[in-house]
Amino acid sequence: MNIKKVYVLLILAVIFWGTSFATAKLGMGSLSPAQFLFLRTFFSTIVFFFILKKVEPEKRKIHKEDLPYIFYLAFMGFTGYFIVQYSALYFTSTVNASLILGMSPIMIAVYARIFLKEELNVYRILGMMLCFIGILAIITKGHLFGIFKSKTLFGDFLIILDAGMLAAFSIGSKRILQKYDPFIAIAHINTASCILLIPIILIPNFLSPVSFVYMISKLSIKNILAALYLALTCTVVGYYGWYTGIKDIGASRTAVFNYINPLVASIVSIVMFQEDISRYTFLGGLGIIAGVSLNNMKISVGKSTRSAS
């Protein structure tokens, strides 16, 4: 693909992802996070279905032995991940959520050290320290000893958990994404997530106190449009653009575009919710971005060195 088109797709992807926090917060309304997520995955499953119909049967097929792992990834990267994220938005600001979630590459480095025995060098350690300091600044607003009095504490910790789930998904998905076309793999993972959500939303439970059957008649235009927007832009277009970037310009150069995400999320939050961005939130966000940059810069340098040898 033309390099300019790749860059346009990547910019669109991160802009759409940057708007997702505010859209979800605004669009959930009276729906539970699980119910709203079902709407999103249902709409995107329909879109993926028509897209995959144009792909050769052999290329769009997932082998039976990979199905259990597809469902595991569906839980870690979609069902569990978004239920936690959408739940967090009840207790924290969309600015905090987007900035803290930006630490996921650092979590990936930690997971890679524990499970893959990858090297944890001084650059990554410094990056982790910067991210940790940044998160503390965001959560405490500069009052370290008042951390447990923070109004957003529970939501912020849920987003940290979310970053851990995203890291687990990123590490775990490598096996599937190397075996299948990434866009096709994501389509199947999204569909598996939709299937996982069906019993959760139909049978009343703590994630869905009222059956979705009852809530169908109460769906508002806002619920539907928000879920449809997230399905089309963040799931279908977003993942297509992201994996096109990885394929055409490489993972390291693609990862740089993710730094636009918190900026977009912050601007949208200020406009839509008049959320306040304190100097500690700003400095904490810079700390997280700097930490992730340090981590990614070393990865890029390491890859260049190995390629040259």
Image (tube, rainbow, N blue to C red):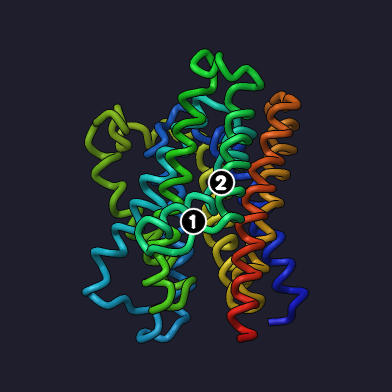
Nearer to me, 198 or 256:
256
Q: Which mark is residue 134?
A: none
Say if 188 sits above or below 64 in the image: above
On the rendered structure, is 221 left or right of 161?
Answer: right
Mark 1 residue element: helix
**Image coords of residue 158 (percent x, y):** 44, 33
Nearer to me, 283 or 5:
283
Mark 2 residue element: helix
For mark 1, what is the residue?
Answer: 109
For mark 2, what is the residue?
Answer: 128
C-alpha distance separating marks 2 and 1? 9 Å
Dot 2, crowdedness within 10 Å: few (<14), some or many (≥20)? Answer: many
Q: Tag 2: residue type?
A: Met
Q: Residue at x 56, y 38 (%)?
A: 132
Q: Tag 1: residue type?
A: Ala
Nearer to me, 195 or 225:
195
Q: Quadrant of residue 184?
A: bottom left
Say if 41 sits above or below 201 in the image: below
Nearer to me, 260 or 196:
260
Q: Residue at x 46, y 77 (%)?
A: 181
Q: Residue at x 44, y 65 (%)?
A: 186
Quadrant location of the N terminus?
Answer: bottom right
- Res 7 visible: yes
**Image coords of residue 73 (percent x, y):** 35, 58
Q: Residue at x 31, y 32 (%)?
A: 208
